[in-house]
Amino acid sequence: MSSQSVLTVKRLTKIFKPDITAVDNVSFSVNQGELVAILGPSGAGKSTLLRCLNRLIPRTAGEIRIHGADITRCRGRALLKLRSDVGMVFQQFNLVPRLTVFENVLAGRLSLCSNRLWSIASVFRIFKEAEKQKAFEALTQVGISHLAAKRADSLSGGQQQRVAIARTLAQEPRVVLADEPVASLDPASSHRVMGILKKICESKTIPVLINLHQVDLAQQYADRIIGIQDGSLVFDGPVDQFTPDIAKTIYGAEFESAVCSAGTSSPPNTAEKETFAA
Ligand SMILES: Nc1ncnc2c1ncn2[C@@H]1O[C@H](COP(=O)(O)OP(=O)(O)OP(=O)(O)O)[C@@H](O)[C@H]1O
Ligand SMILES: [Mg+2]
């Protein structure tokens, strides 16, 4: 694995008015091809941290750099570019239900077009061949190109999350952030989605930063764990150094549910794995 740093966060702080410190002086960096799981109890600040990283919300203080460039002050076109550089995957997929799978993935190209061009293209459903090709490649990478013509709302939760990942890949991000991407999925689908995110990291050397509630999934798939408690970074190290004692300290009363989670099933069998194409 290359040790080139893609994302660097220094002394990041987010205070919600009047005085909720959701992220407190957090510093870390993420390297190319690294899968980093962010763990911590409910309300620890995991989602707020990811939202600051892609500028969905403004940070109060601190630095965020992608490939060395400070992203905290960018505006206008630079902010649009940032949004395409930082792919985001959500727990609830955020697909457009009445559109096809393919159209949803094409939406991933939105951030790469001007808004006006995109509106014209989407209204008349005209897209350049190259755009379609990128969208199809992304669907192939997550193993669901055969579902391209289906309406998004006709798919299972696991399939919808794969569409959402394909949409993110179609925007050709430099880093992917995922906020509890498997929280709404059954154990087998959770493993499939985690496996796809892992392959994206490995084959495209894009770092992936994932908020998770399941310690066991983090241990199976991540290279590194960041532990957050009350907004502060309290652990940052390789998975094998994340001991049960450290987990107990971070989770407190939530320890049992975090360790005995939906992710405790085995990874999918070989036949299911054939659907991974990334
Ligand atoms: N928009 C907001 N306004 C005010 N306070 C907020 C806002 N969003 C989050 N908070 C607070 O910030 C803290 C961190 O919340 P956050 O959602 O980041 O936690 P989390 O670790 O993602 O929790 P969970 O695991 O339940 O998703 C909490 O105290 C929460 O109440
Ligand atoms: Mg959250």
Image (cartoon, rainbow, N blue to C red):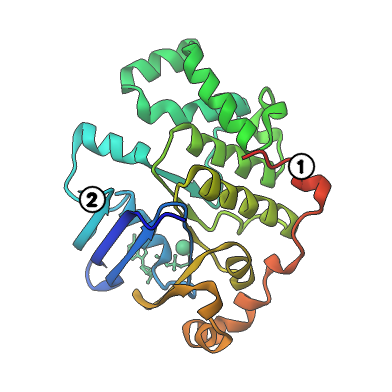
Q: Of the residues shown, which amino acid type is indicated by label 2?
A: Gly
Q: Residues within 10 Å of mark 2 (few under 14, many from 20)?
A: few
The location of residue 244, given as percent across then percent down, is 58, 86
The location of residue 38, given as percent across then percent down, is 46, 66
Q: Which residue is mark 2?
A: 68
Residue 12 shown left or right of residue 148 in the figure:
left
Q: Residues within 10 Å of mark 1 (few under 14, many from 20)?
A: few
- The foreground one among 14 and 249 is 249
Q: Is residue 83 above or below residue 182?
A: above
Q: Is residue 196 above or below residue 241?
A: above
Q: Secondary structure at mark 2?
A: loop
From the image, which quarter does the C terminus lie in?
A: top right
Q: Earlier in the sequence, mark 2 or mark 1?
A: 2
Query: Residue drawn at (52%, 41%), measured in percent from left and top?
Result: 94
Q: Quadrant of residue 98?
A: top right
Residue 46's disc number: none
C-alpha gap between disc 2 and disc 1 = 38 Å
- The foreground one among 60 and 153 is 60
Q: Which residue is mark 1?
A: 274
Query: Residue drawn at (43%, 27%), measured in percent from left and top?
Result: 109
Q: Of the residues shown, which amino acid type is indicated by label 1?
A: Glu
Whether residue 16 is visible to the viewer of this picture, yes or no, is no
